[in-house]
Amino acid sequence: MEESCGKCTPCRVGTQKTLEVLTRICNGNGKENDIATLERWSAILQNAALCGLGQTAPNPVLSTLRYFREEFESHIFKKRCPAGSCRALVAQHALEDRCLTCLEAVAGYDAGGYAAFREVLPELVSADLFEKIMTQGCVVELARFSLIVPSRNQSCTKCTSCRIGVAQAMNILDDIAIGNGRVEMLDLLVELIDTIKTASECPVGRTAPDIVQFTLEHFRDQFEKHILEKDCPFGICREVPAYSADCPFRASQTA
């Protein structure tokens, strides 16, 4: 669009209109007929533009529509970015499909994402998850890792309970993990979780503290051990981690 000379209308207007549609889709405002619109504008550009710039400009659009059409449909109809790249859509995607990437290393189980973990949790808890977390992974680390996505600028920031509450919960967990925790923090954390889940206006906030709540209910003794002994029994919580795509537990095992 920026390099069009402006001589012919198909290129001057077509590239601009194509970019507007793509931007709208990335921002979560896609319309049902946007894919057809992109294909129509691409055909006009290919056939009516006077030079190679306009004639080849729609190639990336047509290629991605050909091979990744389902991603366009996901953006438009489900308001989800499967790659987790479009910031306007990434919060919902992250919680549904990308949260708890460390679960496989900690619990020896690939739940297929946050939603799948919630579905199978009752079956896993009694037989497998309890034992493996107790012997192989730190629940404090698991709890704070589960809050990374919604706390690190992935919340839409619309409601205070999610924007501030999740960040406060994250700060409390960080303090507990690195030996700066106090016993009263656990009760404060429970109150925060209740507030976040009750007052948040969308599923992101309402589900964000679920793993923290689960670990507090079933493994409160591990939290108390971090607070009273100022140490992580598994040697994982030594400092506030700089999170990446790698699970902190897996990184500690391979270090």
Image (tube, rainbow, N blue to C red):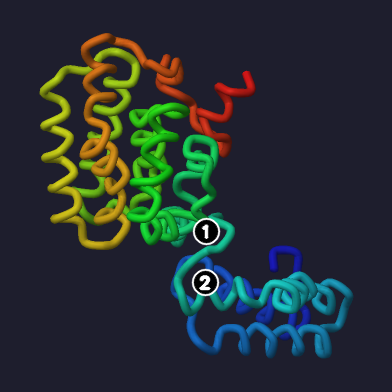
Residue 32's tag is none
Q: Which residue is mark 1?
A: 86
Three-letter amino acid code at disc 2? Answer: His
Residue 75's tag is 2
**Residue 110 coordinates in the image, percent (x, y):** 54, 49
Q: Residue farthest to the right?
A: 52
Task: Give the image quarter of residue 188.
Answer: top left
Helix, strand or loop status at disc 1: loop
The residues tagged by marks 2 and 1 sit, at their Cα atoms, a distance apart of 9 Å
Question: Where's the C terminus, which quadrant?
Answer: top right
Q: Residue at x 42, y 14 (%)?
A: 238
Q: Residue at x 65, y 83 (%)?
A: 38
Three-letter amino acid code at disc 1? Answer: Cys
Residue 178 sits above or below residue 241 on the image: above
Q: Residue farthest to the front?
A: 127
Question: Which of the two discs, 2 and 1, labels the residue nearer the N terminus?
Answer: 2
Label 1 crowd (10 A; few <14 / some 14-19 / many >=20): some
Residue 33 sits above or below residue 73 on the image: below
Task: Give the image quarter of residue 12.
Answer: bottom right
Helix, strand or loop status at disc 2: helix
Question: In the image, 159: left or right of 153?
Answer: left
Front-most of residues 132 and 207: 132
Q: Residue at x 28, y 38 (%)?
A: 215
Label 2 crowd (10 A; few <14 / some 14-19 / many >=20): many
Residue 48 sits above or below residue 25 on the image: below
Front-most of residues 34 and 147: 147
